[in-house]
Amino acid sequence: MMNRPDLPPEIARRRTFAIISHPDAGKTTLTEKFLLFGGAIQMAGQVRAKGEARRTRSDFMKMEQDRGISVSASAMSFDFGQYRFNLVDTPGHSDFSEDTYRTLTAVDAAIMVIDGAKGVESQTRKLFEVCRLRDLPILTFCNKMDRESRDTFEIIDEIQENLAIDVAPVSWPIGMGRDFIGVYDLLGDRLEIMDRADRNKVAESIRISGLDDPKLAEHIPADLLEKLREELEMARELLPAFDRKSFLEGHMTPIWFGSAINSFGVKELMTGIGEFGPQPQPQSAAERQIAPEEKPVTGFVFKVQANMDPKHRDRVAFVRLASGHFERGMKLLHVRSKKPMAVSNPVLFLAADRELAEEAWAGDIIGIPNHGQLRIGDALTEGEALRFTGIPSFAPELLQTVRAGDPMKAKHLEKALMQFAEEGAAKVFKPMIGSGFIVGVVGALQFEVLASRIELEYGLPVRFESSQFTSARWVSGPKDKVDTFANTNKGHMAQDHDGDLVYLTRLQWDIDRVERDHPELKLTATKEMMV
Ligand code: G4P
């Protein structure tokens, strides 16, 4: 993964990334400040204010608020200096890890926010591992430095040890907690002083000629200055210097220290994303790699969200453009159905408002309203039959039977379930024997979210009950063998929403036995969402 000087300027200036963090580390606050400095909102606090307004409209959203989780992901675009940022929001709760995984297929980099007092937490580690699977470059923001936090070396060590990645400080905190006054910018030799009086004010930046500059003493109390000099000397000896190539390859993370709530360190982080990159990267398809500068437009759906606007029963498919220059009204080939699709009302997401996208470039995320044709993993091209790879569907870890409170409403229930399956919110299996559906999710909380959405969006109260099965595996192999297997194991067989065969069981032992007795069959826990 490298930055290239030869990309068309409109593509080269794009930065598409996500923020990952453990709940409470400050992701929302940092997002607000990004939008503030990106000019997408006027005053910090609006993200939440709009969030409140949205929440009052639905119980589902209320639940989101009560639980302190964010279940709906969206993408926001804004300019920062010469750069165009596309920030893709990741769901915050571990129960939605599959969704998070797919979101991360659409970005080129991630910002990892950690709380300076807490260091690397469980969710940080999980999300980091997902980034690593894709070799995503990671920028680290150590937040809440205005509070009592850990020793700087200890924080850096913990990241290096826990996540097995080199950490290169690009700023160094001066003082801590109540005595925190700012940071020393190691790359630009500047002193950034935090303003505690005004939370939205950008830090005062003072050019320094080096650690011996007498100007330092004017701004830093003697004891803190001595400590800073000592620490920086040690840091230069013990820690690697920032190396852009190593960062872009995912081996090194630059770390900034700051305080999102005080708008401190945020601009420096944004400048870092702009300057260090990465630019939109090539995307993998089964057939070949797609380079961003290729003229024909291509893209893939990584998320589908239904009922975003209660007035319209539409769904929005979020598409990451992999190549080309998209213009509104373009006719694209929907590869799975082999049908052309006129994209006449695509949307770009600017803060919380939707705006019609007149044009977009490789790296951008556009939303395409549709009536269900677009599914996760689908490719859109100007004619080539591409299949993008790497967007997996995981076997659910929890299975439950779902029943409508009113048995007459079974058809409605099926419709609702199919929609959620297409959205990727749950796996829905129709058993070959008997009636009803089995719903599979990765985390228990998703059952509640689904029940609440089905009631809210379809007016259908439902009950989830424990199922006789606990595991699901997709079955593939030569057609006649699969058919014979399915027919002799009817009680264990079901179809997913794509009609693909799934083997359900309670016992790992069963899975092992099938694999042993039927070497011609493949039982898999993930299904690549390819057509
Ligand atoms: P999250 O999205 O990662 O879950 O975190 P969020 O931004 O919601 O921040 C979690 C809490 O941490 C919030 O406080 C927020 O105000 C606070 N916070 C964020 N950045 C900083 C910082 O730099 N310094 C300090 N001291 N606190 C920070 P809260 O009380 O939970 O919510 P609120 O009432 O402030 O909204």
Image (cartoon, rainbow, N blue to C red):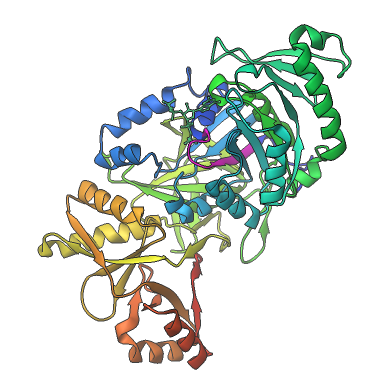
Relative depth, front residue between 238 and 464: 238
Residue 136, given in percent of the width and then of the height, sits at 66, 49
Q: Is residue 345 left or right of residue 120?
A: left
Is 457 rendered above or below residue 506?
above
Q: Residue furthest front?
A: 223
Residue drawn 33% across the image and 29% down it: 52
Residue drawn 17% across the image and 64% down it: 410
Residue 353, given in percent of the width and then of the height, sits at 41, 30
Q: Is residue 396 left or right of residue 530?
A: left
Residue 19 colored magenta? yes
Is 43 rendered above or below residue 23?
above
Residue 292, given in percent of the width and then of the height, sits at 67, 48
Segment colored magenta: 15-26
Q: Is residue 45 left or right of residue 494?
A: right
Is 310 rendered above or below residue 378?
above
Residue 311, given in percent of the width and then of the height, sits at 25, 38
Relative depth, front residue between 229 and 445: 229
Residue 205 colored magenta? no
Q: Is residue 81 visible?
A: no
Residue drawn 71% across the image and 33% down it: 152
Q: Is residue 448 visible?
A: yes
Relative depth, front residue between 16 and 96: 96
Relative depth, front residue between 273 and 463: 463
Count of numbered marks: 0
